[in-house]
Image (cartoon, helix red, strand yellow):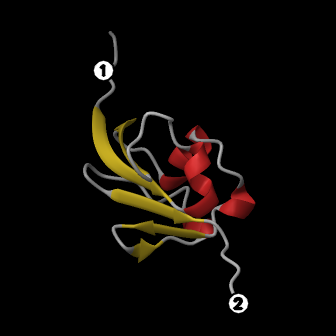
Amino acid sequence: MRTVTKHMEITFKLFATLTDYLPPNRKDNAVRLTVNEGSSVQSVIEQFNLPEKLTHLVLVNGVYVGPADRAGRVLVADDVLAIWPPIAGG
């Protein structure tokens, strides 16, 4: 019997230098993504080949997700996943 994979949409936002990792057809720093149900934050990070050292601040719906929790944090439909690189300022 064939298994049917269910999909859902999330909003994926990258900031600063990470925007280079988004598809070129975007209008700004955000894209709507279709992902498999049960996808984790880490699986989306890996899908876009984001270097671990550049995924400094990761938020889902405005709530911080630490590095140790990213593989276990499962996304649900219409979540907003936002990622910032380390920012140096003065």
State the SS at label 1.
loop
> In the image, residue 90 lies at what x, y percent?
70, 90
Q: Residue furthest bottom?
A: 90
Where's residue 51, x and y in %? 71, 52
Whether residues under marks 1 and 2 lie with C-beta atoms below 8 angstroms apart, the answer is: no
State the mark number for residue 82: none
Q: Residues within 10 Å of mark 1 (few under 14, many from 20)?
A: few
From the viewer's perspective, is 51 left or right of 13? right
- Identified at 33% across, 26% down, the residue is 5
Pinpoint residue 26: horizontal percent, then vertical percent. Answer: 41, 40
Q: Mark 1 and mark 2: span between their CA atoms?
A: 51 Å
The image shows a total of numbered marks equal to 2
Please state, as top left, top right, bottom left or bottom right, where the N terminus lies in the image: top left
At 66% from the left and 76% from the top, the residue drawn is: 87
In the picture of the structure, the residue carrying the numbered disc 2 is 90
Q: Is residue 74 above or below residue 59?
A: above
Q: Residues within 10 Å of mark 2 (few under 14, many from 20)?
A: few
Between disc 1 and disc 2, the foreground one is: 2
Residue at image mark 1: 4
Looking at the image, which residue sits at the far top?
1
The amino acid beneath tag 2 is Gly
Name the amino acid, label 1.
Answer: Val
Q: Measuring from the top left, give residue 40's x and y in whole percent.
A: 47, 50
Which element carries disc 2, helix, strand or loop?
loop
Residue 85, quarter of the rendered image? bottom right
